[in-house]
Image: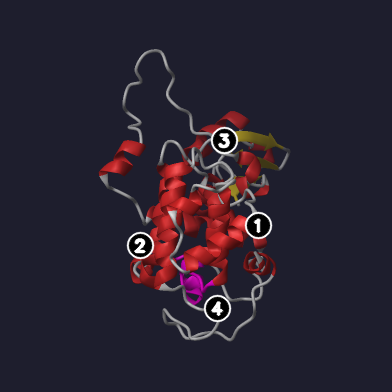
Amino acid sequence: MKSIAKLMKVFTPAAKAPDTLHSSKGPPDITLKCVQGLKKAVKFLETNLESAEGIFSKAGSIEEVSAIVEFIQNNSLSESYLSTLTNKHSVAMAMKEILATYSPLIPSNQYDHFMSPLADYEQLVEKIRHLNGGGLEVVMKFLWKLVHYDRFRADPANLTRNIGIFILRTDKAELYSTNARQSAQTHLKAFTAIIEAFPCTDEESKRQISDPNAKQSGDAAAPVVVVDASAVSIQDRSVKVSFLNPSNKPTQQSLRDDLSRYGEVVNIGLKEKLAVVLFMDPMAAIRCAEDRDGRALADCRVS
């Protein structure tokens, strides 16, 4: 898994490519054979994973991962071999290795466009949707299912951190070289939007997603989707509220009532001149900061 290790540390510096979809430099483009191999890997994971816990983060067998990578590249991944696996996560880690080996499914010279605060994600995705022999669509539809299927309910923040950095990545020296928190939040926002741009609307997908308005039979409670908050830093889930007039600062409850529109508020730490608001979901913190950044809020400023 040398490719993953290399990308997780430092990306190879390269001269700025022209603003086109393809570049002749850098890692090789993914092949059509490889895309077909990825389809088989995705099919196996969709069928055999009981949950999304540890997807793209739990280690697989080194020997199995190495073999699966070669099978995917040659489009020779067979059901008979997959039936012998000792660790299902070997397939996910092999996919991760493939994505780290080849040029990113979202061309690196499009990275700055997706990371722009003015990004039109829908337009950007349409521009690249069918590149790489449909490889991007294969992978992103699978990620959409991981997020939305009832038996998976994966946290987009986990997917962004564990697999998204190989799909939406830059050829700059470091992924988040300056202002790490802001870059990480922007990357999460962008990658979440990209996942949502590849919905599956077939009948099978409809059966895998429960109707939130449907009544539950018997006395069974409706399933609760739990966000793995421990996997995301507190800093990335927080916003700071500065009081312009400390003598007239809001109460914890008034802040909670006002900011809950962005998502579930877990805790509010109230001090003399400021409050730190902790959300359950990092996307809620991002929405709050972007919507209220620098604006007056009942003698307050949110940042």
Q: CA distance from mark 2 to mark 4?
A: 27 Å
103 within the magenta span: yes
Type of amino acid under label 4: Pro
Q: Residue furthest left?
A: 203
Q: Quadrant of residue 217?
A: top left
Pair 2/4: label in front: 4
Query: Which of the marked residues, 1 or 4, is nearer the chain's N terminus?
Result: 4
Task: Please state the extent of the stretch shown in magenta in the rendering.
Answer: 102-121
* Residue that mark 1 sits on: 62
Task: Name the residue at 41% across, 51% down.
Answer: 43
Pair 2/3: label in front: 2
Q: Quadrant of residue 13?
A: bottom right
* Residue that mark 3 sits on: 265
Query: Which of the marked residues, 2 or 3, is nearer the chain's N terminus?
Result: 2
Pair 4/3: label in front: 4
Viewer-proximal residue among 105 and 228:
105
| Place of residue 100 in the rendered image (x, y in percent of width and height, measured from the top left) | 57, 67
Task: Name the residue at 41% across, 43% down.
Answer: 148
* Residue that mark 4 sits on: 27
Pair 2/1: label in front: 1
Task: Name the residue at 35% across, 20% down.
Answer: 216
Q: Of helix, strand and loop, which one carries label 4?
A: loop
* Residue that mark 2 sits on: 122
